[in-house]
Image (tube, grey):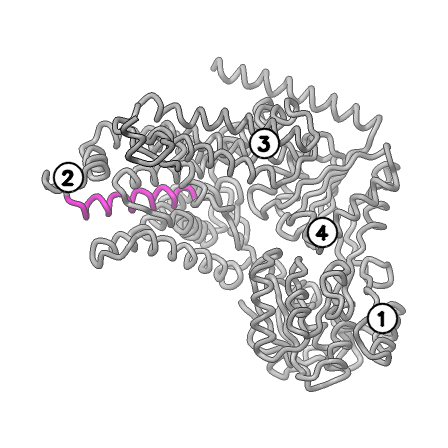
Amino acid sequence: MVRLESRGDVSRAWSLLSPVVAIVLTLISGVVIFSAMGKDPGLALYTYFVQPLTTAFGVTELLVKATPLVLIGIGLSIGFRANVWNIGAEGQFTIGAIVGGGIAIAFHDSDNFLLLPVVMIGGILGGMAWGAVPAFLKTRFNANEILTSLMLTYVAVLLLSYLVHGPWRDPDGYNFPESRLFPAAAMMPVLWEDSRLHLGAALAVLAVVGGWVILSRAVIGFQLRVVGQAPAAAKHAGFSQNKLIWFSLLLGGGLAGLAGVAEVAGTIGQLLPSISPGYGFTAIIVAFLGRLHPVGVLLAGLIMALSYIGGEVAQIEIGLPAAVTGLFQGILLFFLLGCDVLTHYRIRFGAPGRARGS
Amino acid sequence: MKRRTVFKALASALSVGILAAGMASASAQTKVGFVYVGPIGDHGWTYRHDQGRLAIEKEFGDKVKTTFVESVKEGPDSERVIRQLAASGHDLIFTTSFGFMNPTIKVAKRFPNVKFEHATGYKQDKNVATYSGRFYEGRYIAGVIAGKTSKTNKIGYVASFPIPEVVRGINAFLLGARSVNPAMSISVVWVNSWYDPGKEGDAAKALIDQGADIITQHTDSPAPLQVAENRGVKGFGQASDMEHFAPKAQLSAIIDDWNPYYVERTRAVIDGTWKSQDVWYGLKEGMVQMAPYKNMPADVAKLAKETEEAIRSGKLHPFAGPIKDQSGKVVVEAGKVADAGMLLGMNFYVEGVEGSLPK
């Protein structure tokens, strides 16, 4: 019989090292998989994980792809610290894009430089509003925020679909479900010439710094951590649980909304029926991969983005199937969770009583 | 400052590398890239495009190298993939889904020497051509078969997105069906995806439960046809011959044949005669083909063949008047046919389609 036994004290070094071990194990699995597929494993790993980083184009695209993941991941990780489980970042992202994009479409013939700030603030407020609904339901009716925030995601995605199929459809677009293109004044400035690297990437870095300040320097960050780690102590100290729920969901929603508006005003330039390949959900993985720490989230966002872009490069250069991307992400998560379990528990063989005696 | 120079040096080193790679490939091999919206194993839309890619390889052998990227999302990811192909020395790039239109146009502006071919879109440029098939011709024939074989007079239609291409197919199907049986009607279920076998199958089940005994689809997987097979009703293959998924249910299939077009356009790039254009080929040019007519009485198969021949020769136009919309208003008068503008921007249902078009 095999069972898990708590280690009691968790080694801080191992808890930080476990993502690194997971990544190394993923790479080793990669060698096995590529060899089995008859590809040169060295070349395949190089193409997948290194080659995208050898060109300016690859690096900027990596940052473009990581931007929404990091922005959303920061917001989520702060909420997760306080056990506020916002699973609906995808919806908050979408509403951010709808509100910001709606402003851009409404003022499509404007060249006023104030348009972009208004679009961005609109996106943030939109995401916050969508985060406020589960916060209200939780604090008022004690409704589970996992369910409410997740279900609101579908509402948001269908709302976007309705808008681009209906009232916001491009009048010159042959009825195809796309909005008109945003005016130049609503588009985020490009940070690196001849690339798609936009202002959103700089905002993501700011969010990392902001997240770190909140968690390690601000009183509310302290309260968030205490609530998460020792709810009884937090209650005893008189921390307001409701305040922290509101704070977590508004912050998470606002950052997801910013990510959404940055995606449409930074890269796409119009509203489409589908604007996110699941960033809101991938960001949950990013938050945990990053140990709920702002710097960790940044690194995890970059690794996740690399796994997507590397998959595309590997398809183009050495003809690997697209499924390898999903495979790698799955293996990485599997090892990460496995390492976490082994950090917290040790494996014991044999029946409980005997094991202790021997 | 310092970082900037490092970046600049890196960028210029790269562009030299890319240039060198581009020149090398121009002298030796023509590189042709494909961007697919689904997996090559979808047995439908993307599968047929990939067959076109293989046809290029077969035709030109070592003179051409082909590459593809599958399951590319229609959004910001597609622009990166298209650009990556353009930057890695591809001379000709086929982007095979409507949603790749604006990204294709954007990337094409940055790479004036690379030729782009976008399927099913309406925006061209000096180096962007567009192409599509007149699949509505095949739908009309399928409609005729349905009108002759249905007992419940009800067609179940699994549809992807309410864009003109799809609406045109629904209307053509019903016009074909009503040309032989005026009592026919169509119910449509929108699954809001090009490829989602689970949803497609569920939609087909719901339609059969509502009394439809003919199932057809404008999505990319064989799932609706498989459901038809299991439930003992009839259906049609979409984009490729799906007979082996439904040997008893498939009446015929509308087959997209991109092979000749892809070979021709690749040859044009090799010969240096490639020019931007907008083509819309049908049965006549062979871009649209019909799978063998099976699982139906001989007279129905004969009628289907005659209809196919009439469309191919131009004697019959699926959108010949009189055509009425759902409100009963005549939109195409007797003796006329729908013009290109109406076909390309079609956003109304003809009389006999149930429900209203999502707007």
- Mark 4: secondary structure: strand
Please, is residue A175 above or below residue B307 in the view? above
Question: Which residue is tagged 4?
Answer: B119
Magenta residues?
A240-259
Q: Is residue B29 left or right of residue B215?
A: right
Q: Is residue A236 left or right of residue B173?
A: left
In-front residue for pair A256/A268:
A256
Task: Please tell me whether mark 1 or mark 3 is closer to you in this view.
Answer: 3
Q: Give the letter of the chain under mark 1.
A: B
Subunit bearing disc 2: A
Q: Residues within 10 Å of mark 4 (few under 14, many from 20)?
A: many
In the image, are marks 1 and 4 on the same chain? yes
Q: Which residue is mark 2?
A: A234
| Residue hosting label 3 | A310
Tell me whether marks 3 and 2 sit on the same chain: yes
List the residue tagged with mark 1. Answer: B308
Cα separation, mark 3 vs mark 2, equals 44 Å
